[in-house]
Image (cartoon, rainbow, N blue to C red):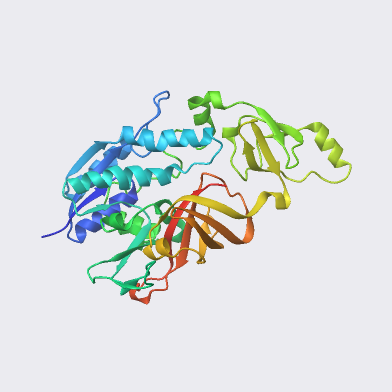
Amino acid sequence: MSKKVAVAMSGGVDSGVAAALLVKQGYEVTGFHLRFWKEKAKDFENKCCDVKSLEAARKTAWKLGIPFYVLNFEKVFREKVVDYFLREYASGRTPNPCVMCNKYVKFGEFLRYVRGLGFDYLATGHYSRIAAEIPNFLPCRQAGKSQIPNKLKIYHLLEAKDKSKDQSYFLYNLTQRQLAHILFPVGEYTKTEVRKMAKKWGLPVAERPESQEICFFPESDYRPFLQRQIPEKIVPGEVVDTKGRVIGRHFGLPLYTIGQRHRFKINLKFKIENLKFRAIPPFYVIGKDIRKNRLIVGFGKETEKKEFLVEKVNWINPIFKLQVSGFKLFVRIRHQGELLNCRIVKLSNCRIKVILDEPYRGIAPGQAAVFYKKVTNCGLRITGLEVVGGGIIKN
């Protein structure tokens, strides 16, 4: 009897090809299109589920000869993604809505829903890979080693074959139990190969453009959305340097992120005084004083950090859950960001300190810090990087 797979079909080429691959592999496939919250104050539809996307997904399902359903996830999306997004910016932090959408919506409520209907797997068009192994042992606190039944599989979340499209950064919250019921069919292909397959099979999504902006507001810039939704939090204030000297004005703390260089004003008097000695260096946002409504800026070494705390940590790989301190890993502090060499020190079950080999600029509280290691297990027969876990940057 073939396995039943629910495919999240957004109307894009990636999820369309994912569904087609599974049909060709003999799975019993059903397509689902998720409706998310949209901003009702404007004539706008959520980019992930507008009318064109719905029709593209529906036509693709018809082409593949699979059942197709539309589900309303507006409420959970509003609560777990949009409200979180606004709350984080209002508190001076930098949110990552895609991380929360994956955690609470796609692989939270939706995965539970389809599993409750009897589906064996949930498949999406994410560019990532999953590999499974049957380990001989796992480290444990008491005895150092303990035998594990052969039926127990350990699941590994790996970066995609196409490094430029890799989305594993957004998936660090996945658990072993979830990974056992998830498929990422396009993770083994490049975007170019996915487009070619869509054209070869005549899928209606073959020529659809991809959108990389946040889906729940129309602009590519988040600031107008904040000004509409939380105007009471957009209050102009002072810009200060690391010594506490007032050197300029800002237009509202939520409009700035750590590492940002522009959109605040430096006083003319400060510029004139400093031009007597040297050129004014570029200033970067390095912090926010919410209580005093002050934007803190700096330059040069002032903008860099070598250590930071990470909370709400999820370890996908059980080895790191049990023996985390002292491991040498790579960390990313933003999607497609540079891989930074680091060492981690465990402070509690879900809180760690990260020590970078070299200082780095733009480490923003609220953003995700995702940890990677090179795949060294020859039994997996896969090369590349594995996501071992991640969490939220505290400071």
Q: Quadrant of residue 105?
A: top left
Q: Nearer the viewer, residue 17 or 139?
A: 139
Residue depicted at 51% across the width and 30% down the height = 226
Q: Nearer the viewer, residue 265 or 285?
A: 285
Residue depicted at 27% across the width and 66% down the height = 153
Q: Give the position of the N terminus as an image quadrant.
A: bottom left
Q: Quadrant of residue 306?
A: bottom right
- In the rendered view, tell whether residue 74 sits above or below residue 129: above
Residue depicted at 40% across the width and 28% down the height = 39
Q: Nearer the viewer, residue 40 or 319?
A: 319
Q: Nearer the viewer, residue 33 or 310?
A: 310
Residue 96, horizontal then vertical, whole percent: 47, 44
- In the rendered view, tell whether residue 223 sits above or below residue 307: above
Residue depicted at 34% across the width and 46% down the height = 12
Residue 199, horizontal then vertical, whole percent: 31, 54
* Residue 75, visible in the rendered structure: yes
- In the rendered view, tell whether residue 236 sits above or below residue 85: above
* Residue 216, visible in the rendered structure: no
- In the rendered view, tell whether residue 352 sits above or below residue 110: below
Residue 383, horizontal then vertical, whole percent: 41, 71
Residue 267 relative to residue 46: left or right? right
Task: Farthest residue to the left: give it.
Answer: 1
Residue 371, horizontal then vertical, whole percent: 47, 59
Residue 147 relative to residue 166: left or right? left
